[in-house]
Every structure is written in C-alpha cells, then in structure tokens.
Amino acid sequence: MSGSVILALVDTFNFDLSELALDGAGKVSVDLQEILNDPIFTENKVLTQEIKIAATNAPNISKAFLDLYRMFQKSREQLGEVDNALKDHETSLAPLPYEEVRDYFHYTDNYIDALDRAAEAFALSLPRSDAGRHADMVDYLLKTHGVKVVMRKDKPGSSTLRAYDPTTKTIHLNAASSMATNLFQLAYQVGLIEQSDLIEQLLDDAAFHTDVARDVCRMTFANYFAGAVVLPYSEFAQAAKEQRHDLENLAFQFDASLEQVCHRLSNLQRPGEKGIPFYFVRIDQAGNITKRHSATTLQFTRFGGGCPLWNVHHAFQSPGEILRQLAVTPDGIQYLSLAFVQTKRVSGFKSPVRKYAIGLGCEIKHAGHVVYADDLDVTEVKNFDPIGTSCRICERIDCFHRSVPPIGKQIVVDHNKRGSVPFKIS
C-alpha cells in the first residue's frame, strides 16, 4: 500500500498511526523523528505521519538514512573539536563496534529466538540437586566437557570475574563474586562451548561491518545465552506473573541479580508468549546510557542527554531503595517507572566500585499487574511527572529544568524580563 493511500485512509477514518504497536518500524520511526528535528532539516519539514510511513514501507532506506546521519554527526563533532586532520575515512566513519551491536539488538527487540530456546532447553535438561544450580553447573561442566571449575581468591582489587584456560580446561572464578555472578559466568562458558555453531550462524546473518563488531557480538550472544539459562523463558515469565513482577522475589527465586531480572523482563518478547512490554535502561553516574532496551513506545535518546525529571537520575541519591514514579511523556502516554542503584564491587575496601542506576518501567495500563503500583493513585493526572526524551527534542516549552533550547524552535530573548529559563520559545 502506497504512502499516499495510507495518508488518505488516516484523513478519512481519523486513524492515529501511533496506536500501532512499536515494532521494529516503530523504533526506526522514533529515531528518524529525533534526527529530523536537527536544524539542518528546517527547510524540509517532514510530517510525523510521513516518517512512520517511510519507516514501515522502506525500512532499509530509513536505516541507511540513520547511518548517514550518524556519520554526519560524527564528522561534525570532529570538526567542532578542530582536529588537525581527519582520521582515515573508513576508520572515522564506520560504525563503532559497540554502537553497531547495540543497534542490532535494538532493532531485533532484544530477543533472539533460536538462542533463547536453546538456553531454555539447556536449563530444563540440567540435572538439579539440593546443592543448588551453581553446584549443578559445576558438576555438569566436569562430567560433560571435562572442564574443571576453581574458585580463586585473587589479590584485593582484582577485577577478573572469569578466566578460562583451554589447555587445562579449567575455569577460574573469583571467589569474592556473588553467587549470581558466578552462575552467569558458568552459563556463559557453556554457551561458548555448546552453542558455537548457532552463534556463528547468527553472526553471519547479522553481517557486521568489522571483525571487532563481530567479536563484540559473539560475547553479547554468549551473555544472552547465559541470561536465558539463569532465567529460562517460560518458567521465568510464569513466575513474573505470579509474583506480580516483584523484582526482589524473582531475584531470590532464580539466584539472579536485580539487574539480570530487569533485563530479562524487558526482553520477554517471544511470539505467542510475550510478557508485559517493559523498558530497561542502565545509566552511570555521569548520565551515560550503558545499556538500553525498550519494548514500550518510550525510546531513549541516541544523540543527546536524558531528562533530569526522570527518576532513574535520582536513584543515586537513594541507594538501597526502589524508587517509584508516575510519569507522562509529551505524547500523553503514562508510565510506571522504577529505579534503583546497583553497586558492583569485586572485593575489599580498595577495590574499584561501579555504581549504576537501573530503570525499569511500563505503560500505566499494565500497572495492575505490577506490585509496585498497588498504593499509587494512577487515576489522578496531577500525580504524573512530565518527563521527556531529552531537552533538544522535548516539546515542553515551559519546563523549569530545560537545559538547552529545543531543536527546530524559534528562540525569543526579552532583555527586559528574565524567567527561570533565559529565553522564550515560539
């Protein structure tokens, strides 16, 4: 169906394209809308409906346009820093390995069916004893693959979590790591050993630009397998429903960390067995997004900073607590947002400490299935904090917390009047 026909149907039947589920095309549409707000496109205003039609009817061209903008932005940043000389063309403009892998998972809904089912099959076949899953995994590796597991007490401050010696077929684990971390590392090693053919086939299908990106994704696929072993799909999805998505109870039940539980909740996207659509994000203390995925209509900024009103940025002020927030985005969609701090220290007072804020949320229409919404009044509009994606593309012109003007809007300066923001927007 052509774009003009779709637009005609929209006008005739007053149909809102935003009511469509945010699939791969929806994610591309959100990214296109963000970059088309750049001032360089001021003379060529593109309607939201046109963007959605392009993302749906011409996804490959749309993704190519996103790649082109990323290359342009990178070149613009280099020029802005007044570099003495541009680096090699291919090196400077090729996608960064982590960016390319992150985009791959972003556009596959962070769900890899073949790998997920293989992990689930392994988890169900693994003999279980009263000793616990960690001991069961150690026993399995020894009996099936002749791989020994040694718990090693490293020097204080060591950041090594796992070290595998293929010559002696020995896995060295850090004795100071949590049980959840070590179980995950063992499952990771199983993935590399038993699923190498599947992983290589998935890598071939992904067709990454560089060998480095391929290596990064091989690691990420093994991580995916490990997470799906620790939290097998159907068993975990059923438990999540029964526990009403109580993060701490689920972590205890599956010997997992809170971060692992949140990440798994966000990728329960198996066809015919989907869970509640959650977004998941991990942010460091500088505000950098280190992990992100959204099965909701909420998409995270890729080309700028986040919104300071979002509770994930407040989590560092309240360690040990799960913060709750009722939030509404400029498009009118309401969310239940959870946030907490995850601290990672290997061992000892002098060992390095990493702190992350974890954000997890869903649309308010699913709040009845989430225990954290039980005592919140979700019917009162004033209880919802107005948040946005980032200041540069946020449409809230009167926001007290605005840091920069929105792209594509006219700035008006009144020299005789000063408000909380030093300019007005028209």
Image (cartoon, rainbow, N blue to C red):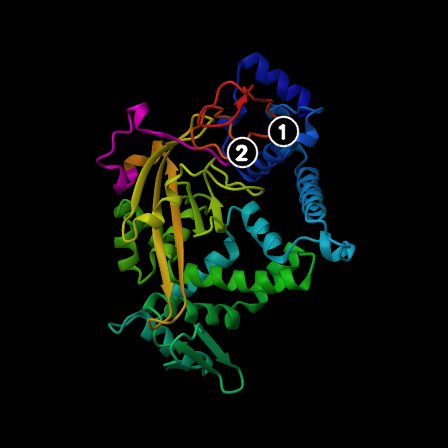
Instruction: Verify whether residue 259 appears in magenta.
Output: no
Q: Residues within 10 Å of mark 2 (few under 14, many from 20)?
A: few
- The quarter of the rendered structure image containing the N terminus is top right
Residue 235: name its quadrant.
bottom left
Seen as rendered, the residue at the extreme bottom is 168
Which label's residue is closer to the chain start, 1 or 2? Answer: 1
Residue drawn 75% across and 57% down? 87
Pinpoint residue 57: horizontal percent, then vertical percent: 66, 32
Local secondary structure at mark 2: loop
Q: In this rendering, which labeled residue sits more in front, label 1 or label 2?
A: 2
Q: Residues within 10 Å of mark 1 (few under 14, many from 20)?
A: some
Q: CA distance from mark 1 to mark 2?
A: 25 Å
Pinpoint residue 401: horizontal percent, then vertical percent: 44, 33
Say which residue label 1 marks: 51
Going by the numbered disc 1, the residue's amino acid type is: Ile
Q: Look at the image and tell me whether residue 418 can be seen.
A: yes
Seen as rendered, the residue at the extreme left is 375
389 up-or-down from 249: above or below:
above
226 up-or-down from 294: above or below:
below
The part of the chain drawn in magenta is 369-392
Residue 309: name its quadrant.
top left
Say which residue label 2 marks: 404
- The quarter of the rendered structure image containing the C terminus is top right
